[in-house]
Image (tube, rainbow, N blue to C red):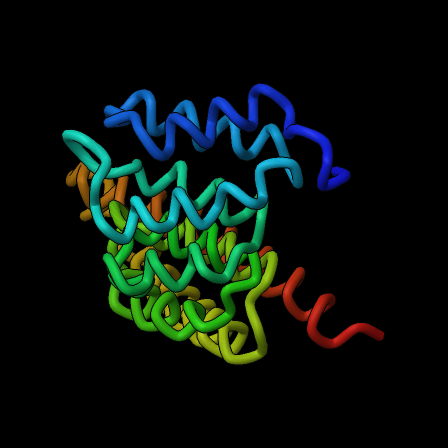
Amino acid sequence: MNQTELPPLNITEMKLRLIHDKLLYDEAVKIVTEMIEAGDEATHLMPLLIKRYKENTFSPSDVPIQSLVDLYRATLNQDLLKAMDERIGLNFMQVKFQCQFLRAGVQSLEESLITELWRSWQEPRSDRDTIVLAFQDVGTQKALEMIDVIDYRLSGDLAERALDVENMTEDFRLHMRFLEDKTFLKLVQEAKTEMRKRIFPQ
């Protein structure tokens, strides 16, 4: 845009809203969505949004984390990433958000997710599937080593449990747990195959 030209009206309106409006929850979501849709034209609005986020001046609640994650993925703005880390700590966010950031190139989160997967891989009602799928897409060799160990451990465990047919037949919960773990093992093995192709291309 030429210095003598005025910015588009929608950008000017967003700027004024960021400066003057209280921006309740839904309005905060709306303006972040509009900034993503505006693309490069809204780049110069990022400092205003980050300033308000750091000062926690959105009313009555904060901008939803999912909206900020979406904004980061669209802009890869490092100042936004730093502000989120300072305010809430990237390593302390829900696993689903950490995985989205990892897919967006925030490789520093892999170690935290490796730790979480090791803690939770034996728990069906955990985030283990989400982490494995993220590692399948962007995990490094270190994540692959973890996946390899889980494959080995779970394969052996399921083979032993499969011999105890009588107990599984009588106990519905044991049977369901077996099926859930069997499904998870398939996911792990598929992820391992794809990671090996990506990390060690022939």
Above/below status of 155 relative to 20: below
* Above or below, 149 relative to 100: below
- Percent of width and height locating residue 186: 51, 52
**Residue 21 figure quarter:** top left
Q: Residue at x 24, y 55 (%)?
A: 123
Q: Which of 54 and 73 is in front in this view?
A: 54
Q: Residue furthest right?
A: 202
Image quadrant for the N terminus?
Answer: top right
Residue 120 visible here? yes
Residue 139's spot in the image, x, y percent?
Answer: 55, 67
Q: Is residue 12 left or right of residue 196?
A: left
Residue at the image position 44 percent from the left and 32 percent from the top: 32
Image quarter of the C terminus:
bottom right
Residue drawn where x is 59% and y is 55% of the image: 190
Q: Going by the image, does 137 lie left or right of 122?
A: right
Residue 111 percent across, percent down from the top left:
40, 75
Extreme residue toward the front, this view:
4
Q: How many numbered callouts?
A: 0
